[in-house]
Amino acid sequence: MTLQSIELRPVSKEDVARILDWITDNQVADAWFGRYSYGNPAHLAYDPSKAKSFSKKKWKEVFEESDHKIFSIYTKNEHIGEAHLAVDEALGDGQLSLLIGRKDLWHKGYGSAATAELISLGFETIGLFRIWVDVPEYNSSAISLFKHFGFVHEGTLRQSRPHKGARLDSVVMGILKSEYRGQSDPTLSSV
């Protein structure tokens, strides 16, 4: 897998407007968090339709002082997605989620590059013990991506995702810091 060159940057109001634009597309919303049971696109940590009008105080609370580490994904000075690491300090773990909003850039290594950056941030900078993801069962590309990084199936949330008039399962996958170190050590067998 070739990792693309990306940069995680602080979120700007212009970035939020693009996120809102992207998640109104059904295919993009389904790849991200799906939709709430009442139909609106789901989003973790903040409501993009309201964020553009946040006061400076509210913006700082959400994007700078929160347990949600939220970043815009950029490549070649172009905003292409959003990445989150929702940290639970008491448990020492974090929920990773990312979206490449530009569908023409899907399956080209940008999601992998962002995943690598978030895993490194979580384990090496923040000092997490475990990083996990919650992926809709229909998103086989995301499941494959996380398997490639050494995430293992930890459980299934039954009928947790509203999707096209039905309720589908989601897959919980996780990786421990000790497993991450094993992957990066060339003397150990590969995962």
Image (cartoon, helix red, strand yellow):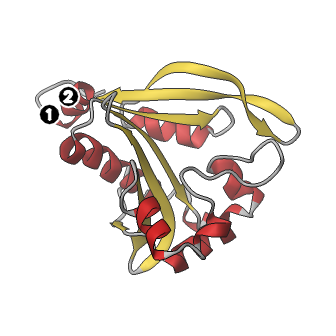
Q: Is residue 126 above or below residue 79?
A: above
**Residue at the location (32% across, 36% down)?**
89
Amino acid type of disc 1? Answer: Asp
Residue 71 seen: no
Report the side of 142 relative to 126 (left or right). right
Task: Identify the disc placed on residue 135.
Answer: none
Q: Residues within 10 Å of mark 2 (few under 14, many from 20)?
A: some
| Numbered disc 1: secondary structure | loop
Tag 1 residue = 185
Disc 2 and disc 1 in contact, CB within 8 angstroms = yes
Task: Identify the disc placed on residue 182.
Answer: 2
Q: Nearer the viewer, residue 82 or 144?
A: 82
**Residue at the location (46% across, 75% down)?**
56
Q: Nearer the viewer, residue 155 or 107?
A: 155
What is the C-alpha distance between the residues marked 2 and 1? 5 Å
Quadrant of the rendered image containing residue 188: top left
Amino acid type of disc 2? Answer: Gly
Q: Residue 7: x and y, percent?
A: 33, 67
Report the side of 72 relative to 158 (left or right). left
